[in-house]
Amino acid sequence: MALRPHILTIAGFDPSNGAGLTADVKTFEKLKCYGLSVCTAVTVQNDVDFKECHWTNFEVIESQINILFERFEIKFVKIGIVENWSILNRIIDLLLSKNSKIKIILDPILKSSSNFEFHQDDVVEFDEILSKIYLLTPNYLEIENLYNDKSIKETILHIQSKTNLFLKGGHRPEKVGTDELFTKEGKQFIFKPKSINISEKHGSGCVLSSAITSYLIVGFPIVKSCYKAKRYTEIFLASNKSKLGYNL
C-alpha cells in the first residue's frame, strides 16, 4: 500500500471536533492523506456556543512545528485560527525556512459561527502574509472585515494581485452557496451549488479548505481542487440534520 502524503494543519482545538484541527485531520484522512497537527489554541466550545479561547504560546507552536519537520516531508500546510497577524507572519516565516517551496492555504477565521471574535491587527502585516501564501479561503463575512477602507470588489482585486482567493459563498447576500475562485493570474471561476438537501454545519469552512488542500497535494490543479472540495463539502453538509457533519 502506497504511503499517504502528509498535510500539516495549524489550527485550534475544538472539543466538539466539528471545527479546527480535528475537523481538518478527519477530512485529510477521508481523502487519503495523513494529517499532522499543531495546536494554536485550546477553545471552550461546542457546536453552537463559543465561550473561551486560550492561545498557545508562540514558542510552543514553534517547537511543535520543528519536531514535525525533523521527521516528515511537508509540502502543504492549512492554517486556521491564530492569535494575530504578527504571530501568523512568524509562523509562515518559520514554515518557509523549513521548506521554501511550501504551499500554505490560509482560512482567515475572524469570528466563530457563534460570533466570538478573534483579535486581529494591522493590515500592513496582513499584506505581507498574502504575498507568502498560496491560497486564501475567506467567507463573505470575513472578506468584508479584512480591509475596512475597501469595498468587497476592491478587496477581491487587492488580494488577487497578491495570491489566489477562494471566496466561500455560504454567507453571501445573494446567490447563497455560490463560491468563486480568483486566481493570481487574473482569472475568475464560479462554482454553483448542486445539493439542495443540506443543513448548516459547525466547521464546514474548515472542511472545505482542508479538502482543497487534500486535492492539491495529490496533484489536482487549483480549479479542479476547488471544484472537488466544494462537492465533497456539500456531501458533508447533507450528511445529517444536526450541526455536526459526517465525513462520508
Image (cartoon, rainbow, N blue to C red):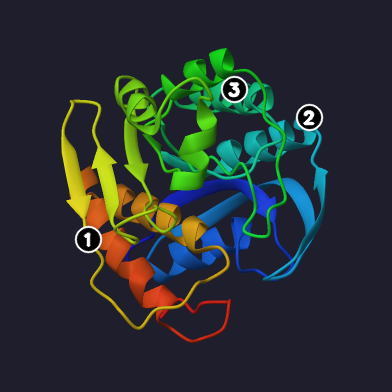
The image position of residue 22, as x and y in percent, is 61, 63
> Is 178 or 162 nearer to us in this picture?
178
The numbered dot on residue 89 is 3
Q: Which residue is mark 2?
A: 59
Location of the C terminus by quadrant is bottom left
Q: What residue is shown at x 38% (from left), y 67% (from top)? A: 233
The image position of residue 111, as x and y in percent, is 64, 47
Q: Residue furthest bottom?
A: 240
The mark that comes first in sequence, 2 or 3, is 2
- Identify whether 108 is placed above or below 205: above
> Is 119 or 163 nearer to us in this picture?
119
Q: Are marks 2 and 1 in contact (CB under 8 Å)?
A: no
Q: What residue is shown at x 32% (from left), y 30% (from top)? A: 153
> Is 28 or 83 nearer to us in this picture?
83
Q: Residue furthest front?
A: 173
- Separation of residues labelled 2 and 3 (CA atoms): 14 Å
